[in-house]
Amino acid sequence: MFLIFKRLWQVNWAEQWQYRANLLMYLLYWLVSPIIYLAVWTSIANANGDVKGFTANDFVTYYMVLLICDQVTSNIIIHTFAYKIQDGSLSGELIKPIHPMLTNALVNNVAFKVLTMIGLTPIWVILFFLFQPDFSGVTFINILIAIPPMLFAFLIGFLFSASITALAFWTTRIYSIHEFYFALILLFSGQFVPLTLMPKVIQDIAQYLPFQLMLYYPIQLILGKLSQAQIIQGYVMTGIWLSVSILLFNWVWREGVKRYSAVGA
């Protein structure tokens, strides 16, 4: 199995380098919103002194870390796989002795992610010198503690997006469904604004949903803003939602493949 993943990595890595313009477009798409949020909230905090206790530096460090976490935990499975179900090109992959989504599509996402991280690095450095954030509260231990939740958050997000993508076995409207899913992420993950600045009802709902595990939780871990009890609770919730995402994906995929039909299938 290791050799299979190694070969898939070589193929997908080489393929990603052939679409550099596409890579740049995706990178800019992911960067624009967080950078705008950073600039807007920093300006408001500078003008008013703070926003409910959040200083300008708090916003800068939050969104600077968010840029990294967002790249690690996000995925593009809806854009790289849905069309295969819709146009029938999935047929050739179903006869291979590997799972179409959990091998090739997964490795493709990881290869894309590595390249976007390379592209993000110089932009992040420029932002660092422009805003000069104070990261004195960030420790090496905090970063180490945040790595497992971020990796699991990527898997959770990937499996949920893969489940939505697999709905293409039933409907062609999956892009609309995924946009609604993305809107939930925007609202409950802390991407638009730190959750502590959101209405209490949003905060209460968010702590039981998987979306805050994808961004807000690892950001707070890295910044050292969580108590030991909150860290443990986050790890537990991550384990629960990872299990749920695995079960959901397996069920949707299994039932969807039963319905699949295409020319040559």
Image (cartoon, grey):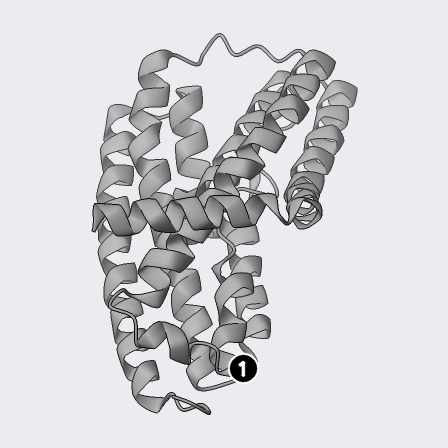
Q: Residue furthest top?
A: 136
Q: Examine the rendered structure and indicate whether residue 12 appears above or below residue 62.
A: below
- Between 167 and 213, the residue placed more toward the observer is 167
- Other-residue count near label 1 (Cα within 10 Å), few / some / many at <14 / 14–19 / ≥20: few
Residue 59 position, x and y percent, is 62, 25
Residue 94 position, x and y percent, is 33, 76
Point 56% across, 63% down: residue: 79
Q: Which structural element holds mark 1?
A: helix
Point 32% across, 82% down: residue: 257
- Between 119 and 174, the residue placed more toward the observer is 119
| Number of marks drawn | 1
Residue 139, can we see it? yes
Is 233 displayed left or right of 105 in the figure?
Answer: left
User: Residue 197 appears in which quarter of the rendering?
Assistant: top right
User: Residue 90 appears in which quarter of the rendering?
Assistant: bottom left
- Between 161 and 119, the residue placed more toward the observer is 119
Residue 141 position, x and y percent, is 31, 15
Locate the C terminus by quadrant: bottom left
Q: Examine the rendered structure and indicate whether residue 98 appears above or below residue 27.
A: below
The residue under label 1 is: 87
Residue 209 position, x and y percent, is 37, 54
Q: Looking at the picture, which amino acid does disc 1 mark?
A: Asp
Point 38% across, 27% down: residue: 221
Residue 199, can we see it? no
Is 254 displayed left or right of 35 in the figure?
Answer: left
- Between 4 and 198, the residue placed more toward the observer is 4
Q: Examine the rendered structure and indicate whether residue 37 appears above or below residue 12.
A: above
